[in-house]
Amino acid sequence: MTGEHGETEYAARVQGEEVPRKKVDAFLASGTATPSRGAGNCATSHNAPAAEQRHIPALTADRTARAERQRRRWATQVVLIDELARRTCAERELPAPPDVSPAAMLTVPEAAVADLGSIIAAALAHSPAARALLTALEAEQHIPEEAVREYYARNRDRYLTPDALRRGVDPYGASAGPADFLTYGQVRGGIERELRQAAGRVAFFDWLDGMRGGVEYAPGHEHPGDPSHSDHEHRH
């Protein structure tokens, strides 16, 4: 469907079913749709030569318009992931997640952005369905005992005792002894949880890649990193 100004009334279609544009508009209006951005978006220096100063308003306007286009595309991805997750939760007969309130978006930790990328980190903060699906995928992961033992053996520096840390023991040095390390039994459960979480995230990424294959975007709502539009940028 097309609105009165020629814009589509949907942001994307998922296997032919429309994701309303108004959902993206509501997310944008909430003020929570703020992707992480680099320092390359700083304003032009006021010390530029006069000939260059004349072009600053046009350059600033162009950068602002470009940033807004990318912000809309980024927000579309967050809303889309919620929609895809809701469908998958229903297919898996998981408990129905509550409706999303754009204004109730949770804080996105910087560590999550670094680990997951800003789109997925924000989607997990925004969408109860995405969180429910990730939890289900994590629970399905089988972590072999040998994988846990191998991780413990390869990461000895993580399991020094507090006393060994105070003494500055080199975990890989000849002087390090068994008493300088937490035992395998003490840390096994934590290692298994970490490995299951990592495997669950990989499964979530794979699920999302597969689901995106059935998505058709309206103009102006493409993925921010899609090279088919002129001002794409591959930031997540």
Image (cartoon, grey):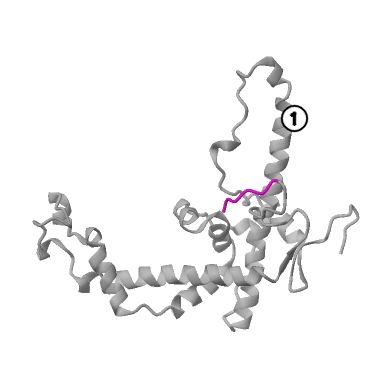
| 4 up-or-down from 80: above or below | above
Write down the residue under mark 1: 58
Q: Secondary structure at mark 1?
A: helix
> Residue at position x 65%, y 60% from top?
77
* Left or right of 178, for residue 148: right
Q: Is residue 57 above or below residue 135?
A: above
Q: Quadrant of the C terminus?
A: bottom right
Q: Is residue 129 visible?
A: no
Rendered residue at 57%/69% (across/down): 130
Q: Is residue 116 left or right of residue 164?
A: right
From the image, give the main secondary structure of the stretch colored magenta.
Answer: loop
Residue 84 falls in image quadrant: bottom right
Outermost residue, top side: 50
Magenta run includes residue 35 = no
Is 232 within the magenta?
yes
Image coords of residue 27 (percent x, y): 68, 56
Locate residue 45, reporting x and y percent: 60, 24
Residue visible at 44% across and 78% down?
139
